[in-house]
Amino acid sequence: MAIKANIQLLTDYLRQLNIDIQANNVILLYEGEVNHNTIKVLLITLEHRFKKSTLSRIVQKKIFNVLVECIQNIEKHTATLITENNEFCKRGSILIIEKPNEIVIFSGNLVDQEQKKYLLQKKLQLQDKNKQQLRSMYKQQLIEGTINHKGGAGLGFIDMARKTNNQIDFYFFGTNSDFNFFVNRIIINKIIYESVNNSSKNR
Protein backbone atom coordinates (compact mmCIF):
# COMPACT_ATOMS: atom_id res chain seq x y z
CA MET A 1 0.00 0.00 0.00
CA ALA A 2 1.27 3.45 -0.93
CA ILE A 3 0.63 6.59 1.10
CA LYS A 4 1.02 10.27 0.43
CA ALA A 5 4.57 11.43 1.12
CA ASN A 6 5.06 12.20 4.80
CA ILE A 7 8.70 13.03 5.37
CA GLN A 8 10.03 11.37 8.50
CA LEU A 9 13.56 12.23 9.62
CA LEU A 10 15.70 9.79 11.57
CA THR A 11 17.39 12.65 13.41
CA ASP A 12 14.05 13.70 14.92
CA TYR A 13 13.49 10.28 16.47
CA LEU A 14 17.05 9.91 17.74
CA ARG A 15 16.38 12.75 20.15
CA GLN A 16 13.88 10.45 21.84
CA LEU A 17 16.70 7.93 22.33
CA ASN A 18 18.89 10.66 23.86
CA ILE A 19 21.35 10.41 20.97
CA ASP A 20 23.36 13.61 20.63
CA ILE A 21 24.68 13.52 17.09
CA GLN A 22 26.84 16.60 17.53
CA ALA A 23 28.68 14.96 20.42
CA ASN A 24 30.09 12.29 18.09
CA ASN A 25 32.06 12.13 14.87
CA VAL A 26 29.52 11.78 12.05
CA ILE A 27 30.95 9.56 9.30
CA LEU A 28 27.83 9.56 7.15
CA LEU A 29 24.30 10.96 7.27
CA TYR A 30 21.76 10.32 4.53
CA GLU A 31 18.01 10.99 4.47
CA GLY A 32 16.22 10.44 1.18
CA GLU A 33 15.07 8.02 -1.49
CA VAL A 34 16.44 4.50 -1.24
CA ASN A 35 17.15 2.29 -4.26
CA HIS A 36 20.03 0.34 -5.82
CA ASN A 37 21.78 3.55 -6.86
CA THR A 38 21.70 4.73 -3.24
CA ILE A 39 23.97 1.85 -2.26
CA LYS A 40 26.52 2.78 -4.92
CA VAL A 41 26.55 6.47 -3.98
CA LEU A 42 26.85 5.84 -0.24
CA LEU A 43 29.59 3.24 -0.65
CA ILE A 44 31.60 5.66 -2.81
CA THR A 45 31.05 8.41 -0.22
CA LEU A 46 32.18 6.08 2.56
CA GLU A 47 35.26 5.08 0.61
CA HIS A 48 36.30 8.73 0.30
CA ARG A 49 35.68 9.33 4.01
CA PHE A 50 37.75 6.30 4.98
CA LYS A 51 40.78 7.61 3.08
CA LYS A 52 41.20 10.14 5.88
CA SER A 53 40.19 7.74 8.63
CA THR A 54 42.33 5.84 11.14
CA LEU A 55 39.85 2.97 11.31
CA SER A 56 41.34 -0.44 10.59
CA ARG A 57 40.47 -2.17 7.33
CA ILE A 58 38.55 -4.89 9.16
CA VAL A 59 36.31 -2.31 10.85
CA GLN A 60 35.81 -0.47 7.57
CA LYS A 61 34.78 -3.72 5.90
CA LYS A 62 32.26 -4.39 8.68
CA ILE A 63 30.77 -0.92 8.17
CA PHE A 64 30.52 -1.45 4.39
CA ASN A 65 28.78 -4.81 4.86
CA VAL A 66 26.31 -3.55 7.45
CA LEU A 67 25.51 -0.45 5.37
CA VAL A 68 24.58 -2.60 2.35
CA GLU A 69 22.38 -4.83 4.51
CA CYS A 70 20.66 -1.79 6.06
CA ILE A 71 19.78 -0.28 2.69
CA GLN A 72 18.58 -3.61 1.32
CA ASN A 73 16.40 -4.08 4.40
CA ILE A 74 14.95 -0.59 3.96
CA GLU A 75 14.10 -1.44 0.34
CA LYS A 76 12.30 -4.62 1.40
CA HIS A 77 10.62 -3.41 4.58
CA THR A 78 9.49 0.17 4.11
CA ALA A 79 6.19 1.78 3.21
CA THR A 80 5.94 3.06 -0.35
CA LEU A 81 5.29 6.80 -0.55
CA ILE A 82 3.56 8.87 -3.20
CA THR A 83 5.30 12.16 -3.88
CA GLU A 84 3.69 15.50 -4.76
CA ASN A 85 4.29 14.56 -8.42
CA ASN A 86 2.32 11.33 -7.91
CA GLU A 87 5.47 9.23 -8.23
CA PHE A 88 6.18 6.18 -6.09
CA CYS A 89 9.31 6.13 -3.94
CA LYS A 90 10.85 4.53 -0.89
CA ARG A 91 12.54 6.75 1.65
CA GLY A 92 15.01 5.82 4.32
CA SER A 93 17.73 7.19 6.56
CA ILE A 94 21.27 6.14 7.37
CA LEU A 95 23.48 7.58 10.10
CA ILE A 96 26.97 6.31 10.93
CA ILE A 97 28.75 7.84 13.93
CA GLU A 98 32.10 7.09 15.50
CA LYS A 99 32.60 6.93 19.24
CA PRO A 100 35.91 6.28 21.02
CA ASN A 101 35.36 2.51 21.24
CA GLU A 102 32.64 1.77 18.73
CA ILE A 103 30.91 2.57 15.48
CA VAL A 104 27.14 3.01 15.70
CA ILE A 105 25.01 2.64 12.58
CA PHE A 106 21.38 3.75 12.56
CA SER A 107 18.88 3.08 9.81
CA GLY A 108 15.35 4.40 9.78
CA ASN A 109 12.22 4.04 7.65
CA LEU A 110 8.45 4.13 7.77
CA VAL A 111 6.70 0.76 8.15
CA ASP A 112 3.09 -0.38 8.03
CA GLN A 113 1.54 -2.78 10.55
CA GLU A 114 2.39 -5.89 8.53
CA GLN A 115 6.03 -4.83 8.21
CA LYS A 116 6.17 -3.99 11.92
CA LYS A 117 4.88 -7.47 12.77
CA TYR A 118 7.56 -9.07 10.58
CA LEU A 119 10.32 -6.97 12.17
CA LEU A 120 9.14 -7.79 15.69
CA GLN A 121 9.35 -11.48 14.78
CA LYS A 122 12.92 -10.93 13.59
CA LYS A 123 13.77 -9.15 16.84
CA LEU A 124 12.41 -12.07 18.85
CA GLN A 125 14.27 -14.54 16.63
CA LEU A 126 17.62 -12.82 17.22
CA GLN A 127 17.17 -12.05 20.90
CA ASP A 128 19.94 -13.41 23.16
CA LYS A 129 21.42 -15.59 20.41
CA ASN A 130 25.18 -16.19 20.63
CA LYS A 131 27.64 -16.43 17.76
CA GLN A 132 27.27 -20.19 17.34
CA GLN A 133 23.48 -20.03 17.41
CA LEU A 134 23.47 -17.26 14.81
CA ARG A 135 25.76 -19.27 12.57
CA SER A 136 23.41 -22.26 12.83
CA MET A 137 20.37 -20.05 12.12
CA TYR A 138 22.09 -18.63 9.05
CA LYS A 139 22.99 -22.06 7.66
CA GLN A 140 19.50 -23.39 8.35
CA GLN A 141 17.90 -20.42 6.63
CA LEU A 142 20.16 -20.93 3.61
CA ILE A 143 19.05 -24.55 3.34
CA GLU A 144 15.39 -24.31 4.30
CA GLY A 145 14.52 -20.66 3.71
CA THR A 146 12.16 -19.71 0.93
CA ILE A 147 12.07 -16.48 -1.05
CA ASN A 148 9.32 -14.27 0.36
CA HIS A 149 7.08 -11.87 -1.56
CA LYS A 150 9.58 -9.07 -0.84
CA GLY A 151 12.26 -10.96 -2.78
CA GLY A 152 14.36 -11.87 0.25
CA ALA A 153 15.19 -15.09 2.07
CA GLY A 154 15.21 -13.62 5.59
CA LEU A 155 19.01 -13.58 5.88
CA GLY A 156 19.66 -9.84 6.19
CA PHE A 157 19.11 -9.31 9.91
CA ILE A 158 20.70 -12.66 10.81
CA ASP A 159 23.79 -11.73 8.79
CA MET A 160 24.05 -8.32 10.48
CA ALA A 161 23.74 -9.97 13.88
CA ARG A 162 26.55 -12.38 12.95
CA LYS A 163 28.81 -9.57 11.79
CA THR A 164 28.29 -7.47 14.94
CA ASN A 165 28.10 -10.06 17.73
CA ASN A 166 24.34 -9.51 17.81
CA GLN A 167 24.59 -5.91 18.96
CA ILE A 168 21.34 -4.90 17.26
CA ASP A 169 18.42 -2.94 18.69
CA PHE A 170 14.95 -2.37 17.21
CA TYR A 171 12.80 0.69 18.00
CA PHE A 172 9.34 1.68 16.79
CA PHE A 173 7.92 5.20 17.07
CA GLY A 174 4.28 6.09 16.52
CA THR A 175 3.42 8.71 13.89
CA ASN A 176 0.30 10.73 13.10
CA SER A 177 -0.95 7.88 10.91
CA ASP A 178 -1.28 4.10 11.14
CA PHE A 179 2.43 3.77 10.33
CA ASN A 180 5.45 3.50 12.60
CA PHE A 181 8.93 4.85 12.13
CA PHE A 182 11.34 1.94 12.56
CA VAL A 183 14.87 2.59 13.83
CA ASN A 184 17.52 -0.09 13.70
CA ARG A 185 20.69 0.48 15.75
CA ILE A 186 23.79 -1.63 15.06
CA ILE A 187 27.02 -1.42 17.04
CA ILE A 188 30.45 -2.43 15.77
CA ASN A 189 32.99 -2.68 18.57
CA LYS A 190 36.21 -1.07 17.30
CA ILE A 191 38.37 -2.43 20.11
CA ILE A 192 37.50 -6.08 19.44
CA TYR A 193 38.13 -5.97 15.70
CA GLU A 194 41.19 -3.74 15.86
CA SER A 195 42.71 -6.10 18.45
CA VAL A 196 42.03 -9.05 16.14
CA ASN A 197 43.56 -7.15 13.23
CA ASN A 198 46.70 -6.26 15.19
CA SER A 199 47.11 -9.84 16.40
CA SER A 200 46.97 -11.10 12.83
CA LYS A 201 49.66 -8.63 11.74
CA ASN A 202 51.99 -9.69 14.56
CA ARG A 203 51.93 -13.38 13.67
Image (cartoon, rainbow, N blue to C red):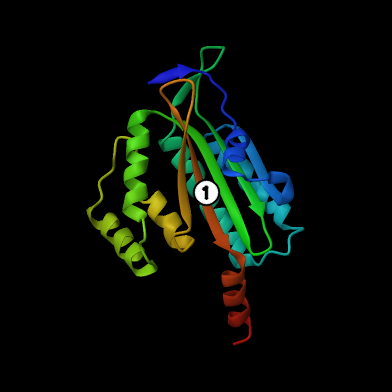
Q: Where's residue 13, x and y in %?
A: 57, 36
Query: Would you say 66 lies left or right of 19 here?
Result: left
Residue shown at 63% from the left, 45% from the top: 19
Residue shown at 68% from the left, 45% from the top: 20
The image quadrant of residue 17 is top right
Query: Would you say 100 lies left or right of 188 here?
Result: right
Give the answer, above or below, for where 201 lies relative to 186.
below
Q: Residue furthest left?
A: 144
Give the answer, above or below, for where 36 lies relative to 164.
above
Q: Where's residue 73, x and y in %?
A: 44, 42
Q: Where's residue 202, x and y in %?
A: 63, 85
- Nearer to me, 158 or 88: 158
Q: Residue furthest right?
A: 52
Q: Where's residue 70, x and y in %?
A: 50, 45
Q: Quadrant of the C terminus?
A: bottom right
- Nearer to me, 62 or 120: 120
Q: Which residue is mark 1?
A: 185
Q: Report crowding for label 1: few under 14, some 14 to 19, many 20 or more residues within 10 A (C-alpha).
A: some
Give the answer, above or below, for where 97 lies relative to 199.
above
Asked if one can make out residue 3 in the rendered structure from this viewpoint, the answer is: yes
Residue shown at 45% from the left, 18% from the top: 3
Query: Would you say 177 lies left or right of 202 here?
Result: left
Q: Residue furthest top?
A: 85
Amino acid type for the residue under numbered disc 1: Arg
Q: Quadrant of the N terminus?
A: top left
* Element carrying mark 1: strand
Residue shown at 30% from the left, 35% from the top: 149
Asked if one can make out residue 152 in the rendered structure from this viewpoint, the answer is: no
